[in-house]
Every structure is written in structure tokens, then in C-alpha cells.
Amino acid sequence: VFQVPSCFALDRFSPRNVMVVSFSVVALGTCLFALAGDLFGMTAARILIGVGTAAFGASIYVIVAQNFERRNFGFLNGMIGTLGGFGGVLAAYPLAVALQRTSWETVFLSMAAVAMVLVVSIWIGIDRGSPPKDQSGKGPTDLWTLLRSSEYVKICVMGFVSYAPIVTITGLWGGPYLQTGLGLSAEGAGGILSTCFVAAIFGGFAFGVMDRSFAKRHRLVLLAAVASVLTFGGLALLPNVSPMVGAALLVGMVFFQQFHIMLGAHLRKIVPDHLIGRAAAIQNVVAVAAIPILQTGFGAAMDYSIAKGASGTAQFTISFLGMAVLIGICAAIYATARNANEDA
């Protein structure tokens, strides 16, 4: 919810100011969580942390857009995504060790201190800059103009299936598929899901590099989407698939879904500088809103299959097939974007 107002602020104030306020809110929320004495206080603190983190992704997006050439946008976003992925992987184990050796209150207070260090670092290290000026003379109607752009809408349609399929599988239904469908142990399923996260890291790097090499990033988005459709189709239609093949298809899907790097570069190409914050915000809201929709739909399809007597991998057939069809439909709509045959 707070992505929208925080990202609108990026078009009005400098990203440095927005990030300083955001990290300060995160530090406050983290500190309150450590000190909270009941569920209500903990929940309020976690909501505050969510409010603070809302602008992080778009802030980096705007900083890159304001300080680097457009032709390097996809490459730099891919590199940033790769570094962020490594940070997520490295943070999990040290955090688990810290929680074993000290109290969670101490851990959260330490993280609040880290957030304040980042506040100071951002204030010192990021150029003060200034937000891009609106040169159109249209004022508030620019947002409406943006939403009326058929090319931007088609990018958002593709964005609907750019991130949610990954979270639907790695965050919720991948574990049940690997254990119930393929018969893997909990430890084995965890290992495959960890491999999926590694695939996401290297996928971000690969697509960032390819953004510099492909003259038509629109075409590369479509090729990656088709590859993703094929992986979901394979998961749906291959009967009694071996654990190795099923795991490989899941990992491949996560890799190919990193086409969101190229999709962001396409958005950067068509959106004027003074609208980049809100354009990114709206696309992010669409991508995040798709997560509960796809997760719930996947589960509903599984319920239907189980009610019809399906078992093993068969109970996932309709769910995987539905994901493939949805990505295919969105890709078909995106294929008609105006810049389909223009150099990106």
C-alpha cells in the first residue's frame, strides 16, 4: 500500500531524502519490535517496518535512472539485483547463528543500529541531487496520461506475471510439490528451493548482461516468457516425472522469470524522467498484487484436482497448466506493444 505514496514522493523529492526517511522508519520499527511486550505491539512494529521498506526498490530504480545512461539501465539493475540476492542468502545463516547465541531482542536492536548506520551512509554517500522537473506543463494529469498509455499498460500486464510466479512456487507451493508430488524429504525439498534462489541470483546477472547485448529487449522478454511457459507446461503434462527433472524445471522457471530486468528497462525507455517514480510504483503494485491472486488460484486448482481423486504429481497438473496459460496470455498482450519492432 505504501509503495504508491512513497514512490510519488520520489518524483517530488530527491531519492536520498526519501531513503533517509525510509531507513529511519525501518530503524524505529525494528527497535519497537525488539521492545514490544505483546502481539499488538509486535504487529504494529512490523507494519511500521513494512511502511519503511516500501520505497527501497523504486528509490534505487530512480537513482540509477537519474545518474546513468538509459542503455545501461537494465545491466545495472541486473547487477544490483544480483548483489541483493547474495545479501539475502548470506544474511540467513548468520542471523540463525545470532538467534541461537543471543536473544532475539538483542538481534533486532542490533539491526536497528545497522539501519541507522545506513541512514548516515546514504546521507553522506548519495548525491543530494534534485527531482526531475515536470517539463510537460500538464501537472497532475500526467499520471492519467501515463495510465492511458497502451504501451505502459502492456508492460504492467507483463509485470503481473513477472514476479508472482516465482513467489507462488518458491514461497508457498514448491515445497508441497517437491514433497507430496515428487516424494522428496523436507531437507531435499529445502535444498531444491535454495537452488531456486541461487538461480534467481544468476538469472538477474545473466539478463542484466544480455540487456547490453540484445538490440531488442522486448523480444528477449518474450523468449524468456515462452521458456517459462514451457517449464510450467512440462511440470503440468509430464506424467510421473522424476525428482531430478521436476526440480530442474522448477529451477529453470525461476531463472527465466528474471525477464523482469528487461521489462524494467523497457519501462525506463518509454517513461519521462519526472514520472519514473510513480511509473515504477504502479508496476510494483501490480506485480505484488498478483502474488496472493496466483497463490490462492494455485491452491484452489489443487483442491479441485484432489476432489476429483488426483494424487501425486497429478494433483498439481491443473495448477501448473493454469500458470502456463496465464503467462502465455500476458506475453501475447505484451507482444503487441508499440516498440515490438524498435530497438530498445
Image: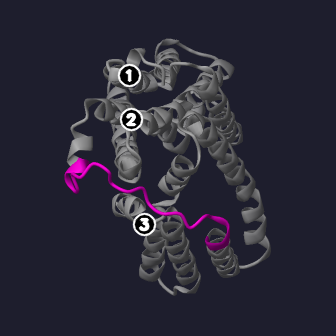
Q: Is residue 182 above or below residue 193?
A: above
Q: Are marks 2 and 1 in contact (CB under 8 Å)?
A: yes
Comparing 320 with 336, the one in front is 336
User: Mark 2 is on which residue type?
Assistant: Ile
Q: Quadrant of residue 81?
A: top right
- Residue 61 in percent (x, y) is at 51, 49
**In which quadrant is the N terminus drawn?**
bottom left
As drawn, the residue found furthest toward the top would be: 238
Q: CA distance from mark 3 to mark 1?
A: 31 Å
Secondary element at image label 1: helix
- Residue drawn at x 32%, y 35% is 152
Side of 107 where 316 appears, left or right: left
Q: Is residue 231 above or below residue 306?
A: above
**Sequence order check, earlier mark of 2 and 3:** 3
Residues in magenta? 123-143
Q: Are marks 2 and 3 in contact (CB under 8 Å)?
A: no
- Residue 171 in percent (x, y) is at 53, 44
Q: Which residue is mark 3?
A: 13
| Disc on res. 257 | none
Q: Quadrant of residue 337?
A: top left
Q: Which residue is mark 2?
A: 270
**Sequence order check, earlier mark of 2 and 1:** 2
Q: Which residue is mark 1?
A: 339
Mark 1, other Cα within 10 Å: few <14 / some 14–19 / many ≥20: some
User: Mark 3 is on which residue type?
Assistant: Phe
Secondary element at image label 3: loop
